[in-house]
Every structure is written in C-alpha cells, then in structure tokens.
C-alpha cells in the first residue's frame, strides 16, 4: 500500500547541507510482478519512474528492492541478447538441479534461485535529479525472477526534496 509523508531531518548543521528540523519528502510503494517462467527479466524502469514522479521529489534518492529472496533488482542494458546471456550464465553457475542443493532437503526445489539472486543483487539506488531518475547511458532498472510463476513484491522508496 502506498505511503507518502514528510519526515524531519535531524542532521547536524554546519552551515551547509540540511538544517535540523528541515523536512524532506518520502514515498513508499510496493509493485507486484508475476513472471510466467521460472527465470526471467522485466524492465521496471517505467513503473519506478512513475513512483518518483508521484513523490514530488526533485532532488534525492530512489531505492528499489526485491522483497523476496529468490528475486533480484539490478541495473543494466535493455538488450535481449544480454538477457539471454544472463540466463545461460546463471544456469551454468547455479543449475536448476534439486538434488544438488542442501537447501532443497527442506522440501523446496529452489536452492538455485537463492544463488542466482545472490549473484544478481537485491537492490539498486538511483539518484533523482530534476524530478527524474538520473541514469548513465543505456541504464535501465530490471526485476529478475529465479523462482517464478507467482506474484512477488518490489519496494520503491523515494526520499529527498
């Protein structure tokens, strides 16, 4: 459920930066994604940009965090060949082989998905400049799924002024 508010900043004032008591804007939103395959990637940049726009923050930071331990958020190029390369590389590093992982002795079959998430990362932080995500050339935000076929959440937290 989206939450928005203003929080007080209690940073020490040395004549520069924020003064004690200055307020900053914040917005928290959870996005839900359901990838139909066991492993897949989705460009979520437009959804994250919408949250930033709705926050009213002009200068600040945006945290995007996968809220499940078998999913990932990362930044890279939106190029289909690269995504196929990632899938092949990840499967070579951590093959989906339920007998291979101690974790699967608990009744799970997703030990590989935990390893893939560890490699691809949990979260990204992107600067907000002029009310927009401030990317380098070709950068986009992606949701990575490694144990799909069910809804999973991604947290988007925007803070700034």
Image (cartoon, rainbow, N blue to C red):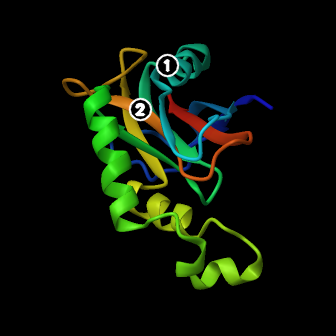
Q: Image quadrant of residue 75?
A: top left
Q: Is residue 35 left or right of residue 12?
A: right
Residue 16 shows in this picture:
no
Q: Pointer 1: what residue?
A: 49
Q: Position of residue 13 (x, y in %)?
A: 41, 48
Instruction: State the residue at coordinates (47%, 40%).
Output: 19
Q: Is residue 145 left or right of residue 60?
A: right
Circle 1 SS class = helix
Q: Nearer the viewer, residue 149 or 13?
A: 149
Q: Position of residue 7 (x, y in %)?
A: 65, 38
**131 shown above or below 74:** above
**87 shown above or below 111:** above
Who comes first in sequence, dot 2 or dot 1? Answer: 1
> Which quadrant of the rendered structure holds the N terminus?
top right
User: Is label 2 or label 1 in front?
Assistant: 2
Circle 2 SS class = strand
Q: Position of residue 140 (x, y in %)?
A: 35, 28
Query: For the residues marked 2 and 1, what is the alpha-carbon distance in whole angstroms?
Result: 10 Å
Q: Nearer the viewer, residue 144 or 47?
A: 144
Q: What crowding class fits label 1: few (fewer than 14 Cα within 10 Å), some (14-19), or many (20 or more)?
A: some
Q: Position of residue 133 (x, y in %)?
A: 38, 23
Q: What crowding class fits label 2: few (fewer than 14 Cα within 10 Å), some (14-19), or many (20 or more)?
A: many
Residue 102 shows in this picture:
yes
Instruction: State the residue at coordinates (59%, 47%).
Output: 38
Q: Nearer the viewer, residue 57 or 53?
A: 53
Q: Pointer 2: what residue?
A: 141
Farthest right residue?
A: 1
**39 shown above or below 121:** above
Instruction: State the residue at coordinates (31%, 25%).
Output: 134
**88 shown above or below 107:** above
Q: Is residue 11 left or right of residue 91?
A: right
Indicate which disc residue 130 carries: none
């Amino acid at each position: 459920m989206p939450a928005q508010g203003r929080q007080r900043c209690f940073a020490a004032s040395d004549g520069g930066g924020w003064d004690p008591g200055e307020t900053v804007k914040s917005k928290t939103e959870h996005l839900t994604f359901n990838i139909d395959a066991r492993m897949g990637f989705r460009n979520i940049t437009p959804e994250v940009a919408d949250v930033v726009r709705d926050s009213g923050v002009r200068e600040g930071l945006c945290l995007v965090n996968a809220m499940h331990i078998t999913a990932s958020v990362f930044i890279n190029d939106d190029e289909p060949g690269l995504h196929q390369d990632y899938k092949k590389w990840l499967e070579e590093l951590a093959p989906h082989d339920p007998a291979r992982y101690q974790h699967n002795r608990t009744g799970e079959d997703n030990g590989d998905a935990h390893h893939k998430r560890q490699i691809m990362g949990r979260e990204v932080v992107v600067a907000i400049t002029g009310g927009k995500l401030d990317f380098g050339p070709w950068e986009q935000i992606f949701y990575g799924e490694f144990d799909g076929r069910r809804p999973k959440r991604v947290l988007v937290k925007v803070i700034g002024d």
